[in-house]
Image (cartoon, rainbow, N blue to C red):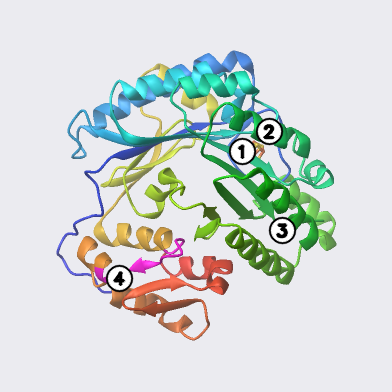
């Protein structure tokens, strides 16, 4: 790989940052889940909120060393999980208030909370609004009750519809819905029926995730026992193509491998990941990127709670981001976007020969129909999006 010694002018390390807050608790375990999540116990809620706030104060001090003068600007906060909506809206508000006391909230702010169907009613949505939350992401996964049961989801299709309507009636104008594709037993018509029902509700944003069999998940064990359950690759490809076409025809434009939105309603927080911008991760197993370093937090709940109580760091791993490391990460994330990656801009920002590195890394895949390079911009094709891991692994 080629790299010259000129340090890059990174994308926007001095612009507004984002904060991700991980709430690692769930009411039960979904069969496909490979995330860090613990059974929810109400007694833990206040401790965990306190721990996140303590962690934030510790990080705030280290932020002083990363080139952000205080008070720094911030324009996105994202509560993900786990299931953030097992917490009371007041707990979410406490964390937002702690962040607000340190950062300038820059207009337009985007504050998202992931909500599982059936966990919040209208009253909770109203309280979230009062706390400043203005975007809701609902994990529907399917609107087929048989599929939901097979996934071990706790909710029904009707619970999802009620939750969506409650969020809308409470005034949320930016609602995203998650759908899971390629689940054992799912058919092309069942997933398209689920999608039709979601579209009828008029969400501003839809995320469609293709099932990944995570190591240690219950579905992995199930598939090992009954080989015939796996959805074959051709059917997954057909599902993906049909979903993209349907969403596009309904005005939800694809802007990322798994994400579709109405004009101007893209997830601004997630765009920070895909465009190599600075974000902080708070909470158990959270990740962050400060510009100079990429870090991830401990994954053991006891350790996280104990360390924050003792005002010790909860960072488990830290990677220094030299220009080449950061460039490769930026390629992997940037190629997820349908607009692709501008290689001339990348060369300027990272002080590297971006075209040369791409040629060295992907040259042997030329002609496989996975990507195009035109006007110095590299983009994945539809086939490339389906097989994106092949492309991304070339930059690791
Ligand atoms: S709600 Fe999400 S994090 Fe919780 S068990 Fe299900 S998939 Fe895992």
Q: Which mark is residue 182?
A: 3
Whether residue 156 appears in this view of the structure is no
Q: Residue placed at 74% from the left, 33% from the top?
A: 159
Whether residues under marks 1 and 2 lie with C-beta atoms below 8 angstroms apart, the answer is yes
Q: Residues within 10 Å of mark 3 (few under 14, many from 20)?
A: many
Q: Earlier in the sequence, mark 4 or mark 2?
A: 2
Q: Is residue 45 above or below residue 170?
A: above
Which quadrant of the figure has residue 227?
bottom right
In the image, is residue 250 above or below residue 394?
above
Ligand 1 positioned in quadrant: top right
Labelled disc at residue 117: 2
Residue 154 coordinates in the image, percent (x, y)? 75, 33
Q: Residue at x 44, y 61 (%)?
A: 337
User: Can you tell which quarter of the image residue 245 is in?
Assistant: bottom right
Question: Between marks 3 and 2, how big is the CA–CA gap?
Answer: 21 Å
Element type at mark 3: loop
């Amino acid at each position: 790989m080629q790299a010259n010694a000129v340090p890059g002018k990174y994308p926007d390390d001095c612009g507004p940052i984002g904060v991700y807050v991980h709430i690692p608790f769930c009411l039960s375990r979904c069969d496909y889940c490979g995330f860090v999540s613990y059974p929810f116990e109400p007694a833990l809620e206040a401790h965990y909120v306190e721990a996140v706030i303590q962690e934030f104060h510790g990080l705030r001090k280290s932020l002083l060393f990363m080139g952000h003068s205080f008070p720094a600007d911030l324009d996105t906060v994202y509560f993900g999980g786990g299931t953030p909506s097992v917490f009371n809206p007041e707990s979410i508000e406490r964390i937002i208030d702690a962040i607000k006391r340190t950062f300038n909230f820059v207009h337009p702010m985007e504050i998202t909370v992931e909500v599982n169907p059936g966990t919040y009613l209208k009253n909770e949505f109203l309280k979230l609004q009062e706390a400043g939350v203005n975007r809701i992401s609902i994990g529907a996964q399917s609107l087929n009750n048989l599929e939901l049961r097979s996934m071990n989801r706790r909710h029904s299709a009707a619970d999802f519809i009620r939750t969506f309507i409650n969020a809308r009636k409470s005034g949320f104008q930016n609602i995203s819905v998650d759908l899971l594709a390629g689940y054992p037993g799912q058919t092309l018509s069942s997933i398209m029926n689920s999608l039709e029902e979601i579209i009828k509700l008029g969400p501003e944003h839809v995320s469609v995730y293709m099932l990944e069999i995570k190591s240690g998940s219950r579905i992995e064990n199930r598939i090992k026992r009954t080989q015939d359950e796996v959805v074959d690759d051709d059917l997954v490809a057909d599902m993906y193509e049909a979903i993209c076409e349907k969403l596009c025809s309904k005005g939800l434009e694809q802007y990322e491998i798994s994400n579709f939105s109405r004009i101007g309603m893209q997830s601004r927080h997630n765009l920070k990941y895909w465009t190599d911008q600075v974000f902080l991760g708070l909470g158990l197993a959270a990740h962050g990127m400060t510009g100079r370093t990429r870090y991830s937090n401990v994954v053991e709940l006891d350790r996280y709670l104990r360390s924050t109580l003792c005002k010790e760091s909860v960072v488990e791993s830290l990677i220094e981001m030299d220009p080449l490391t950061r460039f490769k990460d930026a390629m992997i994330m940037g190629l997820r976007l349908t607009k692709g990656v501008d290689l001339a801009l990348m060369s300027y920002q990272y002080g590297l020969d971006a075209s040369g590195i791409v040629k060295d890394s992907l040259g042997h895949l030329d002609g496989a129909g996975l990507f195009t390079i035109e006007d110095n911009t590299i983009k994945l094709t539809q086939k490339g999006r389906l097989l994106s891991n092949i492309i991304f692994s070339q930059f690791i």
